[in-house]
Structures are given as structure tokens and as C-alpha cells.
Image: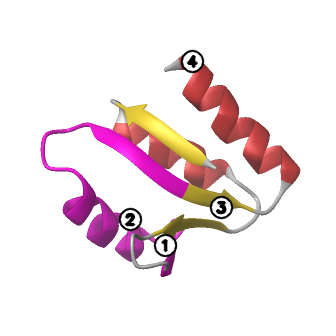
Amino acid sequence: MKVQNINDVDKFFKVIDQCKGKVELVTGEGDRLNLKSKLSQYVSMAKIFSDGTIAELEIIAYEPEDITKLVNFMMEN
């Protein structure tokens, strides 16, 4: 799924942390990073955004309830 215009990165990671299953960031090269790992969060976000906003990410969530959480986050923000 593509997520766009994330203005509140802290809230985004709180939603990721609440997910029960694996949530991965797909890089431009096709690599997958585990977004539930704090190290991966810091490394991936340092590369992706520098102005406090994330324009677009491709993420994969494996659990239906996690997808719902992420969709709700995107609709609320």
C-alpha cells in the first residue's frame, strides 16, 4: 500500500508500533525494511525525509487489522 503526506511522523510510528504483525517499508530498490524495528525506523526515515514530511512510502502490512489501522491513520491525517 502507498501512504502519502505523513506530517506527524511520531504518530505514524506509534501506529506502526501498535500493529500486531510485520510491517515493512519497500525501498526504491525493492528491499524491505522491518518498520517495527527502531533501528530501521531511524535509518529509513533519516534517508526518506529531511523537512519533517514524508511525501510517499510503500509499505506492506500482513495482518488485516494492521492494514485497517494504517488506513485509518491516513484518513485521519
| Quadrant in the picture for residue 43 | bottom left
Q: Which type of secondary structure does the marked residue at label 1 adopt?
A: loop
The range drawn in magenta is 31-58
User: Is residue 39 magenta-colored?
Assistant: yes
| Residue type, numbered disc 1 | Ser
Q: Position of residue 30 (x, y in %)?
A: 49, 78
Say which residue label 2 marks: 41
Callout 4 crowding tier (Cα within 10 Å): few <14, some 14–19, many ≥20: few
| Residue type, numbered disc 3 | Ile
Q: Determine whether label 3 and label 4 are within 8 Å by CB.
A: no
Residue at the right extreme, as displayed: 64
Residue at the left extreme, as displayed: 51
How far apart are the alpha carbons under marks 4 and 1?
24 Å
Say whether residue 75 is left or right of residue 61. left
Say which residue label 4 marks: 76
Say which residue label 1 marks: 37
Q: Which mark is residue 60?
A: 3
Q: Determine whether label 1 and label 2 are within 8 Å by CB.
A: yes
Q: Which type of secondary structure does the marked residue at label 2 adopt?
A: helix
Q: Which mark is residue 56?
A: none
Q: Is residue 30 shown above or below 28? A: below
